[in-house]
Amino acid sequence: MNENYITLTIGKQKNIALIAHDGKKQELIKWCQDNAEILNQHFLCGTGTTARMITDGTGLPVRGYNSGPLGGDQQIGARIVEGKVDFVVFFSDPLTAAPHDPDVKALLRIAQVYDIPIAMNKASADFMLQSALMDQFYDHEVINFNKNIADRAKNMEK
């Protein structure tokens, strides 16, 4: 076993974050309607406006955080770090500038660091949601952050 990594387990019931830029919110709502039977088996959260619109449009319970520009992307990122988000569906709009783009990049980066699946469009979301892994436990390795911090601190003392 490599002490530089730890194994985390994503449960059978996934904690799914649902996020969409303004120009993609209706597309995400439609996707949630089409997949409501599957999504209803998992815990859903999302950034403010998107979460509210999904709940209103589908009846699915979605825990809302702040709107993306008001820190919602960062809140979702913090939930990833805490092990409370297992899966991100983010319908981004690549053709429209977002004023909070650095926040979005930080969220995507932290999802990568913690080896969290990320769907950035309908096709990738469909593939991921239909995966056999959606109904299974899934073990994945991430950096052993406690060891990494201790090693870095020790090296800085020298």
Image: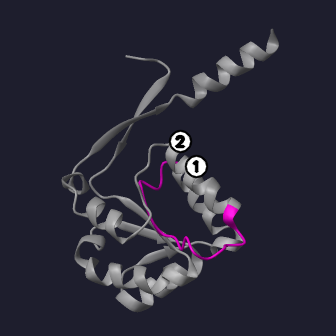
Which circle marks residue 113 in the picture?
2
Q: Name the colour scheme.
A: one colour
Amino acid, disc 1: Arg
Q: Splitting the image into 4 quarters, where does residue 131 fall?
A: bottom left
Q: Is residue 144 left or right of residue 7?
A: right
Name the element at disc 2.
helix
Question: Which residue corresponds to the image point at 58% horizontal and 49% vertical from the top-left?
Answer: 109
The C terminus, quarter of image: top right
Helix, strand or loop for the magenta stretch, by majority: loop
In percent of width and height, residue 9 lies at 35, 41
104 magenta-colored: no
Rendered view: 50 above or below 19: below
The N terminus, quarter of image: top left
Q: Which residues are magenta?
A: 82-101
Residue located farthest toward the left when viewing the structure as drawn: 132
Question: Which residue corresponds to the image point at 70% horizontal and 21% vertical from the top-left?
Answer: 152
**Which residue is label 1 attached to?**
109
Question: Which residue corresponds to the image point at 26% horizontal and 46% vertical from the top-left?
Answer: 137
Q: Is residue 99 left or right of residue 115?
A: right
